[in-house]
Amino acid sequence: MNHNNLWEIESLPMPITQKALQVAQQFATQQRHPQRHEQVYLNTLAVLAVRDYLKIIDIETDLTECDSWNPVIRLFADAGDLYVKGLGKIECRPIKNRHQTQETGNQNSSAHPPEICPVPVEARAERIGYIAVEIDEEEKEARLLGFSPNADAGELVLSELHSLDDFLGHLEHLLESQINLSQWLMNVFTADWLPFEAVFNQQTQTSQVEIQNPVESQLGNWWQNFVDRCLQQLDRGKQNLKNLSSPEETPSFALRGGGNSREESALQGSQSSINRFPEADVTRAKLIDLGMRLGRTTVALLVAIAEESDRTVRVHVQLHPAIGERYLPQNIKLSLISDIGKNLTESQSRIQERYILLKDIEVDRDESFSIRVALDDFSVTENFVV
Amino acid sequence: MRPHLTMTDKSNPSEGEDHLSDETDAVGCSVKSEKFDRDPAHQQIVELVTKACQQPPGSIRRSRFLNQLIREIIKSGKLWKPKTPYYEEALQETWIYLNRNLCEATTAKRPYDPEESLITTWLNSYLERRLFDCRLAPIKESETPNRRRIASSEGKQDKETINPIDYLAADYDVSFYLDELLAWIETDPNNELKSRHVRGKPQINCQVLLQRKCLYGQSLQELAKEFGCAHSTLYQLFNNDCRYLLQKFCEDQGYQTLNIPGVYQNNEP
């Protein structure tokens, strides 16, 4: 076998075990079309190779919530997804041994076959990266050719793949950008999570906001609307955070005056209403841009947390429209995803919805979860760990 | 490379690996010779081992050094590669052995000691033993039912190297359910599948989409071309409506093991 390119030398061979062949064969025979038979066979081998690779370098994965591992979805979708715990799905795309293909191909044409690996539409959703895997059944080897952070063009160009070390760097970066809620409890925040309490300090509001966000003029208005809405809701809200489990109930933000707020001294005006919500220790909001396609696609994700005990934290999540909008876009979906990718709870906006919220969840220490905001086929995921 | 079957007879695969590597050298050079100390490839590997072990266990930093280490080991060409059945199984278990015993001894008595042997020597002696086990008995298959009951607390079981989900997914025969499901898609008795379609195009509905994908093996791109619509539109029909209906069908039928990923079960799209 000749491997002339640098990226070919960089690739890593994983053994294709008898067990993997058995599983792939079994999944393939469930298919009802010869083409699907081969797709599923190769997808399964690719997924298992990447899973085995990640296992030997100590990265935890899970297949229970993966399309590639679901007998029903496997009948319809051409997917090789594998969930990296706490981070998200990677797509393992198989290609058949290119050297065999080339030998036969070259009889008719001297042109080099295009070295690309197609990525179907359903294998591009919510993926944190792509790994191309060359399946060599004869050698019983699955070569991990390399990594790409995206596949927007619907294919991976093999010569442009990044190394597996880059892939691990990518995972490391994702892990570092995980939001650590234990740190929130110690008043440590990243710049993109704005202090929610700041909105109550109307005198310093503008300057606070200007520092933290470039879209100052619009945001000032947005915060004003936000404040008005919040105050309205606070006046009405008498329920505990615990009871907030559906949008039908009285909306309210969960705030606890004290402890972690820089603006605490300026909160006198609304202190009385704030004290009615003693459950939340920290409330923060982040502006999320869902792309420019629909014009008004910035939303504010609000996360309130309350320390329940040494071991658990209660998390409350709301989604609000941003920058001067009264309502959320219709059909925007807010989901809470477990560390292995299970959709634990979900809420979707209807026509003229002012905000949506999720059922509260309790999260154990060291446990991770994700919040996904999705509109049409576009989505943004925020990863959290307690 | 010659197999040392007599030695593997006595040994317990889950422990006591280390004494072997003192006496056995799978690549045929004598252990503790001064040769490998000065071998630049060995020195590079020792450096990687040191760096990997300086990182906290389970950290991606350590993973990155392990990745490099594995590449170097493969590149050295010194890993034993006989043409025997179950070689791939044994090799995979050998990699896991490396992971679990390189810095901290998890399944062996002692972690790898670069002073004592080349890393390939250390790995080859384990590989050899695993191969012998595999040759002795296709034990894996007969052990499967017991192992399947074990919760997936990997790492705690020395020999548990294959995630139980392999067995769950593979051994559980779902073909009957899939037949029923496809029959339902075919007949669509309550018009549920047909009634969910691309806006203004009732002919592009869930029934058609599922059948084309499954029975005709067509891709969403091909279908988008044929139907004259954006593939993202078809994807949304598949991802929202079809998934929801498939989940609903599985729930109605009581197929508890067939939950559809990505569907929040009490929520209609």
Image (spheres, coloured by chain):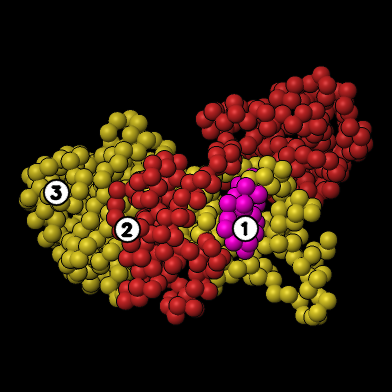
Bounds of the magenta span? Answer: A25-53
Residue A247 as seen in the image, left or right of residue B41: left
- Tell whether position A108 is magenta: no
Pick whichever of labels 1 and 3 is earlier in the sequence: 1
Numbered tag placed on residue A249 in the rendering:
3
Q: Are marks 3 and 2 in contact (CB under 8 Å)?
A: no
Q: Is A254 rendered above or below residue B154?
A: below
Q: Colour of chain A?
A: yellow
Residue B228 as seen in the image, left or right of residue A329: right
Using the rendered view, name the quadrant where residue A374 is placed.
bottom left
Q: Is A160 rendered above or below residue A173?
A: below
Residue at 38 percent across and 45 percent down: it is B253
Q: Which residue is mark 1?
A: A37
> What is the secondary structure assignment of the residue under circle 1?
helix
Tag 2 and tag 1 share a subunit: no
Q: Nearer the viewer, residue A45 or B25?
A: A45
Tag 1 and tag 3 share a subunit: yes
The image position of residue A34, as x and y in percent, is 63, 61
